[in-house]
Image (cartoon, coloured by chain):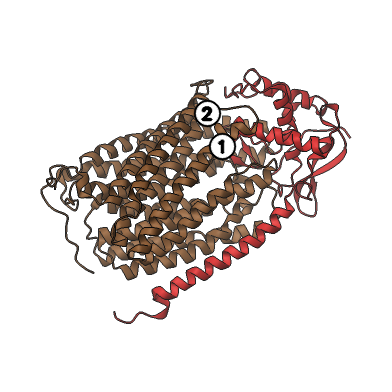
Chain colours: A brown, B red
Amino acid sequence: MAALGEISLSNLNGGQKLAVKYYAMAGVLFAAQILFGLLAGLQYLMPDFLFGQLDFSINRMVHINALVVWLLCGFIGSVYWMLEEEAQRPVVGLKLGNLVFWAFAAAVTIVVIVYLLVQTGRGEVATIWLITEGREYIEAPRWADIAIVASVLVFFYNVAGTFAKGRYTGIAGVLVLDLIALFGLYLAGMFFTPNVSIDQFWWWWVIHLWVEATWEVLVGCILAYALIKTLGARREIVETWLYVEVALMFGSGILGLGHHYFWIGTPDYWLSIGGFFSALEPIPLVAMVVHAVYDSGTHKMQNNNHPAFAWIIAAAFGNFLGAGVWGFMHTLPQINLFTHGTQWTASHGHLAFFGAFATVNIAFFYLAMQKLRGEVWMGAGLPDRGWKWKWSFALLNIGMLGMTVALLVAGYVQSQIERAIGGSSWSAYFDAQAHPWFQQGMWWREVFGVVILIGVVLLAWDLLTVGRRETRVIQTLEPA
Amino acid sequence: MDQTAWWASGSFWRKTAIWVTGASLVALIFLSIDSLVKISAGSQRVPAYTVVNQRVDYVLNEERHVQQPKIGAEQPLFGRKLDAEQAEALVRHGKLTVQAKNCMDCHTLLGNGAYYAPDLTKAWLDPAWGSAAEREKAMVEFLLDPTDNARNTLGRRMPNLHLTEDEAKSVTGFLKWMAAIDTNGFPYNFTPMKQEN
């Protein structure tokens, strides 16, 4: 055993050692996401910047693909992190899991290199197989899709197999079913059709049913585990809440898919169905806030990992605000007609992805560091008052809120000037883009983007140093 | 607390979750089947690819209170009338090019994509192309050399994506076909190009 306060893989179980690899990859991609986001944001202000070398489309593609993959890496890592403790037995196919990790990392590296160096191809099927599919969020070429499917099959085998042979908890039950849906949905995005309406119909099955349904339930599962670990919350309560959230999340989110079917050629009954069910989508997010506040109150906020717990609370509120409030603001077709395809969507997307998902991954990074250093103390009274985690927490949250509001201002200008007044033509589009209020929104977005960058640097520094030379062991939790 | 009320019990919510999810999925599957039929090429909402041979307008439907495409008289693209197979091949090549050049990470199509460049849903009908007579030529020329033909005061330009002439013509065909899709009035309040009667 390594000394307390020193980083050592021997402090972890098999699944957790694999999880740390996924976390490392997630961290690298998180940094890439922010860097390419800053480049793309800068191109709004200085259109000649890197023009012809790294065009906006490339920066933006890497920005959003890094987002998807770092979040998925974090989720996969977190499932592996909890798997052995939850199932109370070793992972069934750990060697295979390790092998797949390296294959996955290699595939991601090749895809990114091709994105950056080859960028685009001829208008033929080979381009879709080898360079890019050119469909937002799932731009990865088809060969990589197949590699991803093969990787997640192994991951799924490990999760389902380990639970099946070990303890099958309520969290396990929800998680296994959710993973089937999550990965099954990916197949809906793996074909070509000349019909753009049918293309986008299935494309939304992947995108919406991921981020507004199966991803939400997945983070529900890993947060349930995190609440048991950090607060000592009672399993019966946490699992009951998880079922409540699944019922509300799938009950609103599955047919809430209809809010993407307003304007893509699909029949107009989706205006009513999509409007109604997506308006209900904030309800499970309110339930999550209630749950988090209830559990924290029951335990008088006594928890054994202050940074992780702060990020869990940020997840509850961030999910509600970013996905719930910001989504609801423009989900009814009567307003969406003016906001669809404007910076409103960018504003909502930024806060929702950050609030609902990035926060959860960061919370797990802290749980991982705590155990990597041998279950050290990370409660009250951290050295230097824990200024690094507190400042990075503040900078990241303020940066993201600032960016969200700046983009929303730009979105207001666009929906008003381009759509309501200008007649939605190309010249109306450019009138709105050139408006000083729009431009100011873009400047502030970039400023807050830099705030986020500083927050991330501080976060990385903190994660690598928190608990170093700590002599106290993890706090024992009192049962509620 | 030994006794949990039935409405607060795990088993009640587990069953509720299963039933709600199942019912929602069944409803989604039925609606999807219906929708896919209604948006297949050649349906009332999504025209056949041969629409590239005809004039496309965008007019207000008084009853629905939204604008919708109106398919008019014969107006073949590039002066050549295509049969069903050729028309599908053209749109297919156009859409493949749109994907291969990653148009969606600057533009939006049907409002989805990135917001760095204008929406392409009704690009075919946009007044920016000048007159209807010059339009298809102007579109091909622009696609072949977009960088020097930027039309905004922001300095934002489209990079030269090195399309072949064939690709540029196919993209033009794809855009004409897409403009003929009934999008429930999106984008709102669109001002189409004036076309002679």
Chain letter of disc 2 in the image: A
Looking at the rendered structure, which numbered label has been put on residue A56? 2
- Residue nearest the observer in this picture, A179 or A433: A179
| x and y percentages locating residue A394 in the rendered image | 31, 44
Q: Is residue A139 above or below residue A114?
A: below
Describe residue B134's horizontal placement relative to residue A229 as left or right.
right
Answer few, some or many: residues within 10 Å of disc 1's Cα (few below 14, many 20 plus, some between 14 and 19): many
Q: Chain of mark 1?
A: B
User: Disc 2 residue type?
Assistant: Phe
Residue at which label 1 appears: B114
- What is the distance, in whole Å, between disc 1 and disc 2 at their CAs? 10 Å
Drawn side of residue B129 relative to residue A232, left or right: right
CB atoms of marks 1 and 2 within 8 Å: yes
Q: Secondary structure at mark 1?
A: loop
Q: Residue furthest top?
A: B148
Residue B49 screen position, x and y as percent: 78, 40
